Amino acid sequence: MRENNLRTLFAQKKLAFNGWASIGNSFLAELVADCGYDAVTVDLQHGLFSVEAAVPMLQAISATKAVPLVRCSENSLGEINKLLDAGAYGIICPLINTKEDAEKFVRACHYSPRGGRSYGPARGVLYGGKDYFEHANRTILTLAMIETRQGLAAAEEILSVPDLDGIFIGPSDLAIDMGLAPDAWNDDKVDQAFQHLIKLCQARGKYVGIFCGSVEMAERMKAYGVDMLVPGTDAQLLRAETTRRLNILRG
């Protein structure tokens, strides 16, 4: 089966950079993936497109060296099964608030006896290889999103779930749930939560990723020792670079 390079980088203790495809277009997804990211996540939670639109985006990402990931819209066995069948090599699942949420998520990502995933990988075999079934359970990456105070409080229990590879921190929703603005990543309470989650993962040998809305935040998370960071969505980076160039040209 095709190697999951994110697992390789994790084993080598090397930071992975994850692109974020929030615009439902296969060419743009391919363009983002070709920029040098180690992985690209197709965002079905906040991206304004459907599972059907995600398939050609996964195909486009697969034409590059980037690992194709998906953030599912919800903790649904049906949707997660469909995305894995379509060739996603990892799932980021939003709003994991309890150990039970994490168990449900992990079960959807694994074939029996480790889970309840239904067999029918379709495009997954084309991307992963003919021995997909034999190796999928230990190749697919499972990351539970911690983005609420409830999830933060239950983080140790969530990380104790067998076959959960780690967590992905949602900083904006976590800040909002703490009564702060979405971009309050620099607030002491939010920063302490980041450090707590990162240390928990490091102590347990678990994967930890985070979305970063600015280079300054990304630099700090890099210093904290995260395994994967997202330096912004495709839409954010397109807007930022367009604005920068126009400002220069307009003087």
Image (cartoon, helix red, strand yellow):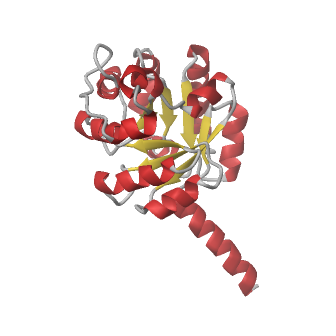
Q: Horizontal and vertical percent for residue 111?
A: 30, 22
Identify whether 134 is placed above or below 40.
above
Which residue is rendered at x = 42% and y = 43% of the image?
Answer: 70
Which residue is rendered at x = 43% and y = 22% of the image?
Answer: 135
Which residue is rendered at x = 42% and y = 18% of the image?
Answer: 163
Does any portion of residue 94 appear in the rendered image?
no
Q: Horizontal and vertical percent for residue 149?
A: 43, 33
Q: Is residue 120 left or right of residue 145?
A: left
Tell me where residue 199 sits by quadrant. top right
Does any portion of residue 164 appear in the rendered image?
yes
Identify which residue, 9 or 172, lies in the foreground. 9
Identify whether 237 is placed above or below 62.
below
Identify which residue, 26 or 130, lies in the foreground. 130
Identify whether 35 is placed above or below 219.
below
Q: Is residue 191 left or right of residue 102?
A: right
Q: Horizontal and vertical percent for residue 112?
A: 28, 17
Q: How many marks?
A: 0
Q: Is residue 193 left or right of residue 154?
A: right
The quadrant of the picture occupied by the C terminus is bottom right
Q: Horizontal and vertical percent for residue 210?
A: 56, 39
Identify whether 179 is placed above or below 90.
below
